[in-house]
Amino acid sequence: MADTAKKQKKSFFDWFLSSSGAISISVILLGFLVGTILLLIVGRNPGGMYKAILDSLIGVKNNKGVWNFRNVGESLAYSVPFILCGLSMAFAARVGLFNIGAEGQYIMGLAVAQVVAVCIPPFPGQWLVCLLVATLTGAIWGGVVGILKAKYQVSEVVATIMLNYTGLWVARLICLACPNATTFNIGTNLPATALLKKFLITNSNLNIGFFFMVISVILFWYIMEKTSLGFGMRATGFNKEAARCSGIPVVKSIALSMAIAGAFAGLAGGIVLIGGAYPKGHVVSTMHNYGFNGIAVALVGNNTALGTMLAGILFGVLKQAQSIMQNYNIPKEITFIIQGLIVVFIALRSGLELYRQYRAKKMLQKEVLAK
């Protein structure tokens, strides 16, 4: 009986080490635990942090006892660009690439969407055209990197970093070329035909862009898991040379994967612009950091469609909680610390994998010696 219990315990431990989902949940809890300890050290009540997070997750009751879901709507609205930029990083990662350029792809999508919104006379369906050109622009910005990597072996890390800053200043020039543009905005309201319709939750910026995000998550999953194209991409990510020997078009897989990754980020830029965050438009002057945060979202989500979506919602909830935390005398910077800790802890996954392989090797040696 004791041997059986011991064997079951080992089996559970092995399962934990080999389960990316279990590890992700554990590191998230660990990040919150460390954040709680830090608040106690500086003399703040951690309960305020968790109250703010809960308010962002389920809403609050007003003075009349009526439930107000505005915070929920804002959390979901914030989560959309986090998720889409996370998908951008995750899609490339599944093909063995490291897309640090989601920020530049996001910014370029935002800038070109603004051109369509303010430089073309209003017409029905203008918002859809804005999203389409934003998506296409992101795909082009990412596809350039894919071609450079596939054909000329240019490091995608270096190329995407450089294109982030190139995109920032190109986007600024594009935005300043819009009519009535000032240092920060275009000075006039975006036309109603270019704005995404808000839905369900009043007084929040949650809009139909949320549905485009959900479609993107499903599309990511379908391409990667259910198509021959996705199989070729995943095979390329595991071993490029083996994939090439098997007849898989590696160059096409790499180039196309970066284009699709860029499309996700470009769509995020378009949704942020016409989703209500910038009613008077926006002249880009600095990074918005959605693309960079998308890297963390993808890592926490294990580069999977569902995992990235859940991780993006977590980051959206934390972002919305920042403003609420001040009501409880909690510095909003604690959310950045928690996010950073989660990323640091998730990076330890490689060490856990090495330990799992070491244990498996030792157990195999014992079984061989026992025979």
Image (cartoon, grey):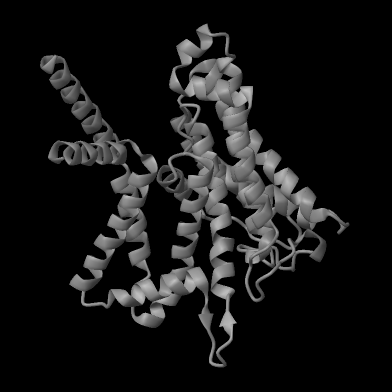
**Residue placed at 68% from the left, 54% from the top?**
211
How far across and how far down the image is residue 128, in percent?
78, 51
Tell me: 342 left or right of 146.
left
Q: Quadrant of the C terminus?
A: top left
Task: Inspect this view and state whether residue 170 appears.
Answer: no
Which residue is more in the foreground, 177 or 192?
192
Coordinates of residue 319 in the picture (x, y in percent): 46, 64
Q: Is residue 338 left or right of residue 279?
A: left
Quadrant for residue 29, please give it: bottom left
Residue 33 sits above or below residue 39 on the image:
above
Quadrant into which the N terminus falls: top left
Viewer can see residue 49: yes
Residue drawn 24% across and 40% down?
Answer: 13
The residue that appears at 37% across and 40% down in the rendered structure is 20
Res 45 → quadrant? bottom left
Give coordinates of residue 6: x percent, y percent: 17, 39
**Left or right of residue 168: residue 182:** right
Seen in the picture, residue 27 relative to 105 is either above or below; the reply is: below
Rendered position, 200 above or below 355: below
Residue 288 position within the rendered picture, expressed as x and y whole percent measured from the top left: 52, 55
